[in-house]
Amino acid sequence: MDLDDLRRIIQRSTDAFRLETLPQYLVPQEETDFAAWRRGDRVRAHPDRDAWLGEMRDVISAGRRFWRVRILDYPLVEYSEFELFGYQDTAAVGQEVFVANRAWNTDLADLHEDFWLYDSATAVSMVYDDEGHFLYPELRENVRPYLEIRDRAVRHAVTLTDYLRKYEPDLIADPV
């Protein structure tokens, strides 16, 4: 499977779920924003100025569902803080974001594989190196284990808003 195959799956799906389990994701699309974050700049993305965010807003408005669970480990690394801040922008355009602390429940301890589930029928594992650089997507034949993992992660997660209010209030972004 290559990225074009993945794009075709994304384009025809109406429900896209993502599980994220790594401490950081070092992807080229975020380098500039993450560098700004590290300098102390808390830049908010807006769908009229950010192509990905605008596209997400448009497809969600058209009835597609995008949702994710982010499993965190403590202490948070700087990237995880950056990500929690940025999720507020995707949530503002309709993405459902849930967060769980791996230490909350032993059911989360073995969740270390990142993946997408499309329409609860197609599972795509996202393969990264040890530092968090994306390597390739891998189509999985058996969807059942990924559905079970998704349900387990959701069961132990809370909404982004509730998570930030209770555990990370310093990361709550000012309104756009």
Image (spheres, helix red, strand yellow):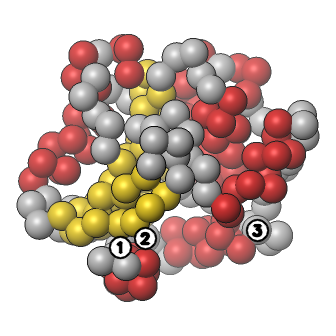
Q: CA distance from mark 2 to mark 1?
A: 5 Å
User: What secondary structure is marked by label 3?
Assistant: loop
User: What secondary structure is marked by label 2?
Assistant: loop
Quarter of the picture containing the N terminus is: bottom left
Does residue 61 appear in this view? Answer: no
User: Residue 172 at what x, y percent from top left?
Assistant: 74, 30
Which-is-in-front pick, marks 1 and 3? 3
x 36%, y 14%: residue: 104
User: What secondary structure is marked by label 1?
Assistant: loop
Q: Mark 2 vs mark 1: which is more N-terminal?
A: 1
**Are discs 2 and 1 less than 8 Å apart at CB?**
yes
Residue type at mark 1 is: Thr
Residue 125 versus residue 48 in the image, above or below = above
Q: How many marks?
A: 3
Question: Which is nearer the eye, 19 or 3?
Answer: 3
x 57%, y 15%: residue: 75
Residue linked to disc 3? 50
Q: Is residue 85 left or right of residue 65?
A: right
Q: Mark 1 vs mark 3: which is more N-terminal?
A: 1
Residue linked to disc 1? 14
Q: CA distance from mark 1 to mark 3?
A: 22 Å
Which-is-in-front pick, marks 3 and 2? 3
Residue linked to disc 2? 64
Residue type at mark 2 is: Arg
Question: Which is nearer the eye, 104 or 173?
Answer: 104
Q: CA distance from mark 3 to mark 2?
A: 19 Å
